[in-house]
Image (cartoon, grey):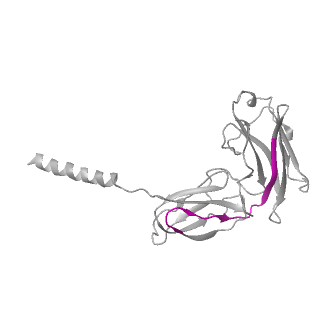
Amino acid sequence: MKQFIYSIIFLAIGLTSCEYDNYEPPKSELSGRILFEGKPVGIRQGISVLQLTQPGFETVTPINVNVKQDGTFSSMLFDGDYKLVQVAGNGPWENISSTADVSVNGATTVDVQVRPYFSINNVSVVVENNVVKSSCLLVNNVAGRQLERITLILGKTTIVDDPTKLVPNPADPLSTKAGTGLNLSQPILLSQNLAVAPLTTTPFLYARIAVKVVGVPELLYSNVFPIKP
């Protein structure tokens, strides 16, 4: 009798396991870009700026959308109707919470419009005589917002941001400029000497311009440029 009972238990476990094995993962991709005036906005990869909810599932935790540093995002979902929520206060742009209705049916694309406090335009990064030199134009998009600093940062991977940047020793005073008194009508020139630790021993280097706005935790970033790819 015990053997018979054990057999039933194992059979039930096996059937449950098969149900889990036969679970169909979501197959529809929702993708898009965070844009300002038609151009992607550069951010720190991984910050929570977009979430998805599905009407009718009140107790379900919102789905965080994976946004890359170049402003592109994607999530694998089941077909259905969703709400794409812009999380207020989590990005380097105007603090506005907005919600868009999104109907997912197969591959679906949707772009999110934001107004960053500043725009980094006409960016160029070159290496001359073992010095990284950058140039850009900075535009103030939101009246009353003040620039705290603009910095040329370097990283050892293609993912470059302020928290993970390499810290040259000694620091190059020309690699950062304070926002106070900076003339935004002229190109902003920054540079970093590569002949200092740890840059001399780092086999791969990538550069990016980072902009810090007064009172805003998250920075705004340019594209990433290979220095020692």
Q: Residue at x 81, y 46 (%)?
A: 124
Q: Is residue 118 magenta?
A: yes
Residue range in magenta is 103-125
Of residues 208 and 40, the one drawn nearer to the viewer in this rendering:
40
Horizontal side, residue 5 vs residue 88: left or right: left
| Residue 208 spot, x, y in % from top left | 75, 45
Of residues 173 and 158, the one drawn nearer to the viewer in this rendering:
158
Of residues 109 and 48, the one drawn nearer to the viewer in this rendering:
109
Q: Quadrant of residue 138?
A: bottom right
> Is the residue 32 above or below the residue 221 in the image?
below
> Is the residue 202 above or below the residue 126 in the image?
above
> Is the residue 84 above or below the residue 155 in the image?
below
The kind of secondary structure the magenta stretch mainly shows is strand
| Residue 91 spot, x, y in % from top left | 68, 58
> Most extreme residue toward the top, as rendered?
201
Horizontal side, residue 17 vs residue 44: left or right: left
Total numbered badges shown on the rendered structure? 0
| Residue 219 spot, x, y in % from top left | 73, 52
> Is the residue 92 above or below the residue 175 in the image?
below
Q: Is residue 57 magenta?
A: no
Q: Residue at x 77, y 61 (%)?
A: 117
| Residue 207 spot, x, y in % from top left | 75, 41
Identify the image quadrant of the C terminus: top right
> Most extreme residue toward the front, as rendered?
107
